[in-house]
Each structure stands twice: as C-alpha cells, then as structure tokens.
Amino acid sequence: MFEFFIPNNIVCHAVEAMVFASISCGILGVIIARMNISSIGFTMSHAAFAGAATGIFLGLDSIATAILFSVLVATLLGPVSDKTKMSIDTTLGVMFAMSMAIAIFFISYMQYLGRGFSASGLLFGDVISLYREEIYGLAIISVITIAFIIMFYKEIIALMFNMKIAEASGIRTKIVFYAILFIIAVSVALNINIVGGLLIYVWLVTPAAIAYQFCYNMRDMFIVAPLISVIISVFGVWAGFEYTLPIGPLIAVIFTMAFALAVILSPKRRITSSKS
C-alpha cells in the first residue's frame, strides 16, 4: 500500500502494520479508557496469546486460533458477569488468569517436549516477518472500527457516560457493548504477531491517555488518539531500523515518554493548578 513511498518491502510492511494497528487500537483505547475497563486490554491480549500458543501446539494457524480464543473470551464476559453477579473487572481478572495459565502451560509443555518453540515473537511482536494477509486483516479491522464508531457514536457516548442510564433511556446497551468487546477481541488477536501479547496493552491505553491531556470532548479524542499512535509508531519503526533496535519495545518506551511529556505540558494540569 505504501510501496510508492517506501521501496524497502520489509520497512514498508512494518510501517503499514503499525499504521493500521495504531488506528484500531487508538480508537478502541478511547472507549476502554473512558469506560474504565482498562483491564480488558491485558485480558484480551493474554486471551489472544493463549489462543496463539494453543494453535501452535496443535499445528494450526496461530492467528486463527488467537481470534477464536479472543472472541470466545469476549463472548463469555457478559454472560459470566450476569450469572455470577460480579463486576466486569472481576470477570476480566478471572479470564486473564485462565488465559495466562493456558498460554504458560502450552509453551512450557512444548519446551518440555523439545519442540524448540520460542514465545518471544508472541510476547513482544515481530514486525520483520509479516505476511501481506496479516496487514490486510489489520486494514479491514481498522475500517470496521472507524465505521462502527461513526454508526453508533451516540450509543457509545451514552455507554461511556453511564451504562445504566443509557439502558434506561432505551439504548440496547448489551448489543453495543458486546460489539465493542468483539471488535477489541479481533483487533488484539490480529495485532499479537506485530505488537506482542505483553505490549498490546500499551497501544490500547497510552494513546488515549495522551490525547486526554489535550482534548476536551470525545470526538476530538477519537481523532487525536489514533493520530498520536500512528506518529509515534511510525517514528519507532524508523528508529528501530535505523539504529537496529527492537521495534515493539522501543515504541512502547516512546509511548511512555510521550505520556510523561503530555502530563507536563497538559493545559488541563495548568488549569487545575491555578484553581487550587
């Protein structure tokens, strides 16, 4: 897609993957941060991690099994919370522990069998060896995410404000909420080979946190968060190839530094300080 601007195929694929990953994760991160369900990020990432590890153990396509496992966890979240009368965060904690246990079990068992499996690619991502189909998948989920936000913007805003009030107003909160979980699940699963199971949480939370320091309404956050994510991710790809550094962890570090700088420069911080 960007071959006209970037002749090197490896660098081009890495940039394309990071751009599409940043768009979907940046937009979804705004919803996650504003609904105070940030734990869904690491739960879904480890669900995808567990699914990928299971797929590799069974000799199946790791992306397909990661998507399947993530969607299964997303599907179970609501009903389990309703049946057990527990909060979503508590259910997420249980799902996180289960996913992590499954992933560690299969990875350890493969190493015990001497199959020579290395989990570093699943944990930290690998933008060097990407297939064109993976980038197409990221592009599709990015388009779906944007379309979903545009079509259900009012419902999403109502959910982020207060789910119970939204439900009392006649909004089908469960359908919209489950759709959000489904999109997050698929997006995380598609990103696991690129960003990594341990680092995807950074893409889901930090850009929204940075955007919040400068934005005063949700519409702006939905634009600024993915834009920040794209800029930092593309810069990280360039710096990683230029100085031979691990790209995923490097971008995660840059995100953290950008957040610290955003907090220092935030006009909201200056307003709060002046009032106090």
Image (tube, helix red, strand yellow):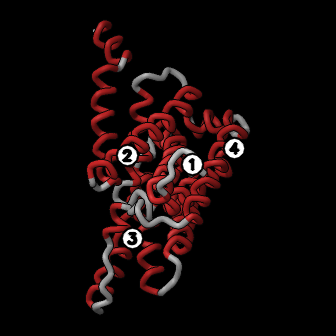
Q: Is mark 3 on a helix, strand or loop?
A: helix
Coordinates of residue 232 in the picture (x, y in percent): 40, 39
Q: How far apart are marks 3 and 1 (CA)?
A: 40 Å
Do callouts 4 and 3 mark residues in contact (Cβ within 8 Å)? no
Quarter location, residue 42? bottom left
Residue carrying label 3: 98
For residue 124, above or below residue 212: below
Which residue is rendered at x = 38% and y = 76% of the image? 102
Q: Which amino acid does label 2 sit on?
A: Trp
Q: Which mark is nearer the camera, 3 or 1?
A: 1
Q: Distance between the residues labelled 2 and 4?
A: 30 Å
Residue carrying label 1: 2
**Mark 2 nearby-residue class (10 Å; few <14, some 14–19, many ≥20):** some
Do callouts 2 and 1 mark residues in contact (Cβ within 8 Å)? no
Coordinates of residue 124 in the picture (x, y in percent): 33, 61
Q: What residue type is labelled 1?
A: Phe
Residue carrying label 4: 147
Q: Is mark 4 on a helix, strand or loop?
A: helix
In the image, taking residue 241 as reference, residue 173 lies left or right, namely right
For residue 115, above or below residue 238: below
Which residue is rendered at x = 49% and y = 75% of the image? 62
Q: Which mark is nearer the camera, 2 or 4?
A: 2
Which residue is rendered at x = 28% and y = 44% of the image? 253
Q: Which mark is nearer the camera, 3 or 2?
A: 2
